[in-house]
Amino acid sequence: MHSTRPRPHPDRRRLRLAAVASTVLLSLAVGVLPAGATAPPSAPAASAASTASGLDRKALNASLDAFHQAGMYGAYSAVRDGSERWRGATGVADIGTGRPMHPDFEHRIGSITKTFTSVAVLQQVAKGRIDLDAPIGDHLPEVVPGERGRQVTVRMLLNHTSGIADYILPAFPQLVTDPGLALDEGRFRERAAEELVRLGLAAEAPAPRGTHSYANTNFLIAGLLLEKVTGQDPEAYITRNVIREAGLRHTYFPRSARISGPHARMYESFYGTIAPARDYSVYDMSWAGTAGAMVSTMSDLNDFYRQLLSGKLLGAAELREMKTTVPAYEPPPGQEVAMRYGLGLYTLKRPDGGWYWGHDGGVFGAGTWALSTEDGRRQAAIGYNLMKYERFGEDGQPLPDPIGAALLAHMDEALSGAPAERSHGTSPVPHRLVPPEQLRR
């Protein structure tokens, strides 16, 4: 199916793609970017299921509906406060048939996988098999050879200060010239982690070693490290020792290009260069592996982060290491850093001066965000099925983003319990929660 809209002049199209190419490297990590998209077909209002609680279900339904009304095709969300729960869904799972969303759909969670992988590595730290500050070359000299292998530590991989580049653009080189073709050609392509790591190691380093610079390559190397020290396939090890240990029933690494349980179609727009947006819910996720291949539900994610932050999955020493953070970006003069990255886990500054903990994830067609208060008491997770809906002007600058503003308003309300402003203005960064990728630029 092809768009009938006039295509941009080739030179202008190349300029626009080049302008957003830097954001592609965050494609596993971001679920929240700036700008707008055409509203999808109408769909039923948000539905909810919960225990009797003090959570404001009406307000949560309204803010989730506002996300759909702003242009998001469909979304599902889960919120917890102590023993009280709310689950909701809005919009459509299939824009062709109008099939509605359901709160319990399974969903590709992208880089939230990194938290699971980091927990598995820290389990091995607790057993004395891995030293966080030992060079990765001590374990994997054939994967990270030479001087780099001697200088990059395991900790640097997990907090993205290794100076190693991302493999995404080298693995999908046509993303910059023809994103639709690049994604279509990769749909059933199986990629070995070693191959992808080689691409990342060969690419130009985006930042000096010791400075945070997000790269999926780091967590594929972490998966190879797990394989080396446990003698097991890393995805199988994480399944047995993290997912099952947490008692998660709908969280897994997919065994094929298909999601096994009920799920929505997942649409990729790639900043308007794929028009109309295409469904990539069927996709071989070997390109993401231990950096971003997992499937879960929003309720499972809340269960996982509650157990993690309350100390049920790691010992106190290992959880303390996980929560030891570095600045995720260089703030403007006079401003405080509002995002810090630990070991597969980041923290965002709250309006009251505290911090939310969690991660976000984005793969082709699917975005997710899961955040929690530090004690694990109040949590919110949201998944949605239209990615890179943002639009950029001819100058490469982001245009107004009502979808992103509505997303952040829902998360604000879900986490704080206080209604948030639902601005559809020109600012790509709403007033309280700051989307991670905005800080990383």
Image (spheres, helix red, strand yellow):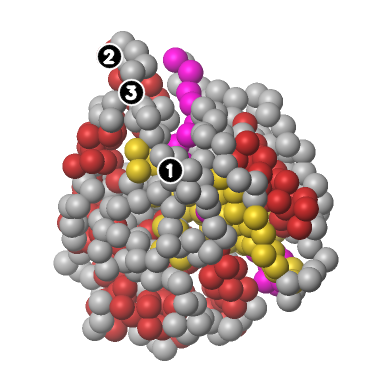
**Label 1: which secondary element:** loop
Between the C-alphas of marks 3 and 2, the distance is: 16 Å
Of pointers 3 and 1, the one earlier in the residue sequence? 3
Total marks shown come to 3
Describe residue 55's horizontal placement relative to residue 45 as left or right. Answer: right
Q: Nearer the viewer, residue 376 or 215?
A: 376
Q: Check the image and report above or below for 5 versus 354.
A: above
- Outermost residue to the front: 97
Q: Which residues are magenta?
A: 372-394
Kind of residue at disc 1:
Thr
- Outermost residue to the bottom: 127
Residue 196 seen: yes
Of pointers 1 and 2, the one earlier in the residue sequence? 2
Is 190 a magenta residue? no
Q: Which residue is mark 1?
A: 97
Between the C-alphas of marks 1 and 2, the distance is: 34 Å
Q: Please state the horizontal and vertical placement of residue 196, each as a whole percent of the image.
A: 22, 54
The disc label shown at residue 3, or none: 3
User: For the point 57% across and 68% down, which residue is it?
Assistant: 299
Q: Which residue is mark 2?
A: 10
User: For the point 64% across and 78% down, which residue is it?
Assistant: 310
- Check disc 3: other Cα within 10 Å, few if <14, some if 14-19, many if 20+: few
Q: Please state the horizontal and vertical placement of residue 14, each as a whole percent of the image.
A: 30, 20
- Location of the N terminus by quadrant is top left
